[in-house]
Image (cartoon, rainbow, N blue to C red):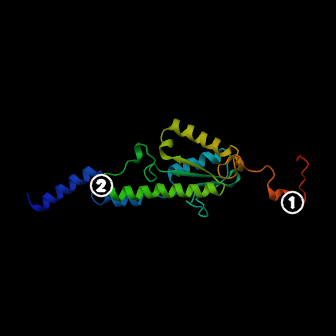
């Protein structure tokens, strides 16, 4: 057996281990789309049939949400489990080039958390739908029904959202602060 034959056999064994023929992995990865994926289309179709109207992939907002429902102040992100590190069986880190993939996927997760926090600070409700929740027909129906219910549920008032209004005033705070006493409409009729 010549050196060239040995190299070919080694390449074939490596391709079998990775699950792809030599040179095809790059092509396959290039075909993965960032928007209008099958799970996004399926989700949008369900919401449209239920009478909801929305904008899709709106670039004005952090993270370019897949579905924006301004009437309900809600944004929906439909995430692939692998690319956004969901933690389910579909989100395992590839065995080759582990360092690169771990860093990349961790950055994706951190970026998602930051963008969701920004949107929530602006008063938006953020809902994430995971790819694994839409795999089987039964799970898909259940998740999409729950998604619809989450969207149409009333938003909590600003007082109910932590950080927007004090839950309890400090114990030593005066009942009528000095600034209120100086106001022209202030009446001290309750004082003894």
In this view, 161 is above or below 178: above
Please tell me whether mark 2 sits on a helix, a strand or a loop: loop
Q: Which one is nearer the viewer's eye here, 79 or 123?
A: 123
Please tell me whether mark 1 sits on a helix, a strand or a loop: loop
Q: Is residue 53 left or right of residue 91?
A: right
* Mark toward the start of the polypeptide (1 vs 2): 2
To which quarter of the image does residue 118 belong?
A: bottom right
Q: Residue drawn at (86%, 60%), measured in percent from left and top? A: 183
According to the picture, the residue beneath numbered tag 2 turns out to be 96
Residue 97 x %, y %? 31, 57
- Judged from this view, the residue extending furthest toward the top is 138
According to the picture, the residue beneath numbered tag 1 turns out to be 183
Where the N terminus falls, by quadrant? bottom left
- Judged from this view, the residue extending furthest toward the left is 1
- Judged from this view, the residue extending furthest toward the bottom is 60
> How far is disc 1 from disc 2 in space, using C-alphas?
70 Å
Q: Residue drawn at (56%, 37%), measured in percent from left and top? A: 142
In this view, 190 is above or below 107: above
Give the class, few, some or many, for how many residues have Cα within 10 Å of label 1's Cα (few <14, many ≥20). Answer: few
Q: Which one is nearer the viewer's eye here, 92 or 3?
A: 92
Task: For residue 8, say whether it is visible.
Answer: yes
């Amino acid at each position: 057996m010549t050196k060239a034959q040995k190299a070919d056999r080694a390449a074939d064994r490596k391709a079998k281990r990775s699950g792809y023929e030599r040179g095809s992995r790059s092509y396959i990865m290039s075909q993965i789309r960032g928007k209008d994926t099958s799970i996004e289309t399926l989700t949008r179709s369900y919401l449209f049939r239920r009478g909801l109207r929305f904008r899709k992939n709106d670039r004005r907002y952090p993270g370019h949400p897949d579905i924006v429902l301004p009437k309900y102040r809600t944004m929906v992100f439909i995430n692939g489990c692998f690319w956004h590190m969901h933690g389910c069986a579909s989100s395992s880190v590839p065995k080759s080039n582990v360092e690169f993939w771990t860093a990349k996927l961790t950055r994706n997760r951190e970026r998602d958390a930051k963008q969701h926090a920004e949107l929530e600070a602006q008063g938006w409700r953020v809902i994430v739908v995971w790819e694994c929740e839409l795999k089987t027909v039964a799970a898909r129906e259940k998740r999409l029904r729950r998604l619809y219910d989450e969207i149409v549920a009333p938003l909590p008032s600003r007082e109910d959202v932590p950080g927007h209004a004090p839950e309890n005033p400090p114990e030593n705070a005066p009942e009528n602060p000095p600034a209120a006493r100086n106001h022209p409409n202030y009446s001290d009729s309750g004082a003894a």
